[in-house]
Amino acid sequence: MENFTFYSPTYFVFGKDQETAVGTYVKRFGGSRVLVHFGGGSAEKSGLLNKVRQSLRDSGLAFVELGGVQPNPRDGLVYQGIDLCRKEGVDFILAVGGGSVIDSAKAIAAGAVYDGDFWDFYEGRTVTEALPIGTVLTISAAGSEGSGDSVITKEEGMYKRATTGEALRPKFSILNPALTQTLPAYQTACGITDIMAHLYERYLTNTKDVEVTDRLIEALLLTMIKEGPKAVADQNDYQSRANIMWAGMLAHNNSCGVGRSQDWTSHNIEHELSALYDCAHGAGLAVVMPAVFTYNLHHDVMRFAQVAVRVWGCQMDFAHPEETAKAGIEALRAFLKSIGMPGNFAELGAKAEDIDELAHKCCWGDVNTGTTGGFVPLNEDDVKAIYRLML
Amino acid sequence: MENFTFYSPTYFVFGKDQETAVGTYVKRFGGSRVLVHFGGGSAEKSGLLNKVRQSLRDSGLAFVELGGVQPNPRDGLVYQGIDLCRKEGVDFILAVGGGSVIDSAKAIAAGAVYDGDFWDFYEGRTVTEALPIGTVLTISAAGSEGSGDSVITKEEGMYKRATTGEALRPKFSILNPALTQTLPAYQTACGITDIMAHLYERYLTNTKDVEVTDRLIEALLLTMIKEGPKAVADQNDYQSRANIMWAGMLAHNNSCGVGRSQDWTSHNIEHELSALYDCAHGAGLAVVMPAVFTYNLHHDVMRFAQVAVRVWGCQMDFAHPEETAKAGIEALRAFLKSIGMPGNFAELGAKAEDIDELAHKCCWGDVNTGTTGGFVPLNEDDVKAIYRLML
């Protein structure tokens, strides 16, 4: 295990009806003039936004609103949010929505107290300061409710880039599993896939002697395998959504990723797909992960065999561990298909003729190293080959 | 899953040599006049205390010292610490040691800012305020480095009682696994047993639909089973101690215990043993746990069968699940014996003739309900029967 620091100071409020007290939490964590940030019409239609407004009023808090966050949130709205915060003297940002809304709120929070262009933070500058953030989560997926991470898409060129910083961790997050019950099965499945990807990206490590974090990741994957299909099959199954919601937070607050190298190849390769085609991030990951794992299998056959046996219940083939490793990848592929996720480029709406561009952006767009991935460093040719495995 | 809140704002600094920067962390979390609280001679002899003093001096911090914390820490030293804090205007308490030192530091931290007798907090009064605390952990066991809990023994009558409060969570905890390498095998094993007890106390629940926390607890138990014997066999095995140290924190910061009823029968029954005989808490738990689980087996056979299969690798006896459940308890008993823990009253130094007194104190001393335990409410006769299973 490697040296690390771990800091997760978010106050989590979990369970039914907790969003009705959101005003008291905003006050507790120092807010007085609030920006309420949200997405499309679903938070309005479900009545959630009215509950939030009422609670803020009951707590005597002033607020302004900025809706319209899209999936794969864009820099354009972030600039609007920063202007609004400055004009209105906002001192607290409340994100009501899923990972896209929370990520957009984090970008606004960092940008509002920074003299330069907020995009600097998505090109490598460290976030050291930000307005405080609170969240009311409506989708179990990104884990942004408990992380210091944010991903934004730059409209010019459609680049999707990430930043991270302790100042971006929410002060509080309200996790009511019932709020996710309005999600269609497809979006539920996309969230499940994203959570599983966060776990696999941490599982694929080159660090030795990490039994505790291996076991924790396996525990959360096993939870997703049991609870995921129940949530997809029955929108009203509160308990499966509760299990998924807590697992989704733990999958990405890094308690199970500390002290070990991590991968993030699948995320990097997927980000180019959702940036170009505006597909759901989880759907993209469902296509990307089996391809990446198949390509990287020989880097550490025993690691893939371990997850196959411990998580997917495959029998260990002691004479041919590689067969077990492959069986684990096939089990993942079958699981993702069973919950309704796409399995290839065509089902995703991606095009073979874009592969060169996708691979180039992936390896050269974010950093200038020409490679991507923490488990196996992959160059542009490798990434092209991986995209071709998805055809 | 039940509604819950979860808040773990401790900044964890994990790994080799991290204690040399302790002064910077004290400053970061607002300390200027520090009480350094520690136990016996081992922290002095190992050179740890000198490293801590040097770091505090390097950061320009004033400090006073109070050593002498014993295992099963006593109220007498807490009163001394409170007086010292007031006299010296202490604004930060730094605990250098294991659970006993940290628990004693927490009692001082709460008492120093309270007008009444600090013992009130151990008789049911809520802790709402305390001096900030930091820790340099030297034993993986109690989990006090990441919890808001504290257990103190009242010398008059030898009552061992607990309190809890968010204000008692450390601001930072430095976890260097190498600092635990000076521990003899017996104390290492006591710590392992305590960590496993924290997991079992949470596992034994009456709440349904808690797959995520079940799986997390199992993950940490599996880690202890793999890494524990390595740490006991080889004092210098850094990696096993690293895995145990992170597991020990997670076992008790409640991330795997949220949203479910918990038991704490074994702890309550053990506390009377270590209070009366001053035995190591972990050693007492090794004797208590198999007895409690055997007594409670029929309350939920399938829960005991689940841990037997998933954690201990027992084969499920589908015709007779009770046999599997029992096999799991026997596997735990054999494991504890294999790491050198006592298995009965005689090996612990406890006496059959004290059983009536032990059971009475356990059921009537702490609360006035006459029962103990969250999994199965047990009365005085039940507790007597459980103690007799340990003969």
Image (spheres, coloured by chain):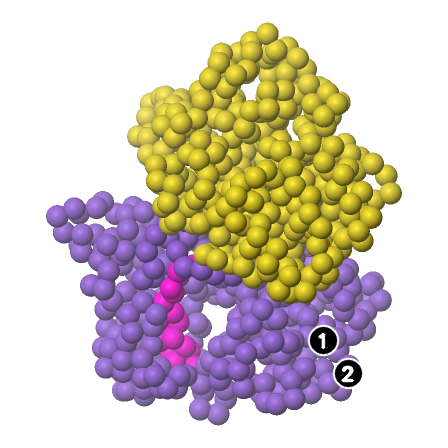
Chain colours: A yellow, B purple
Identify which residue is drawn at 48% across, 77% down: B162
Q: Is residue A271 left or right of residue A177?
A: right
Residue bearing mark 2: B88
Q: Is residue A280 visible?
A: yes
Number of other residues with Cα within 10 Å of mark 2, as a class: few under 14, some 14 to 19, many 20 or more? few
Give the amino acid type for the residue marked by disc 2 in the picture. Answer: Glu
- Does dot 1 land on a helix, a strand or a loop? strand
**Residue A287 place in picture, x, y as percent:** 49, 22
Q: Where does residue B282 sit, x and y in percent of width and height?
A: 42, 68
Q: Chain of mark 2?
A: B
Which residue is at the front of the view, A117 or B196?
A117
Name the quadrant containing residue B23: bottom right
- Proximity of marks 1 and 2: CB atoms separated by less than 8 Å: yes
Tell me the distance, in whole angstroms, between the alpha carbons under discs 1 and 2: 9 Å
Q: Is residue A130 above or below residue A56?
A: above
Find out whether residue B272 is within the magenta segment: yes
B294 relative to B89 in the view: left or right: left
* Quarter of the view holding residue B165: bottom right
Task: Provide residue B149's location: percent of width, then percent of height.
Answer: 53, 71
Range of magenta residues: B257-275
Seen at 36% across and 67% down, the residue is B263
For the residue marked with disc 1, what is the amino acid?
Leu
Q: Give the residue drawn at x 72%, y 82%.
A: B85
Residue at the image point whose x is 23% and y is 73% from the top? B389
- From the viewer's perspective, is residue A169 above or below residue B91? above
Q: Which residue is mark 1?
A: B35
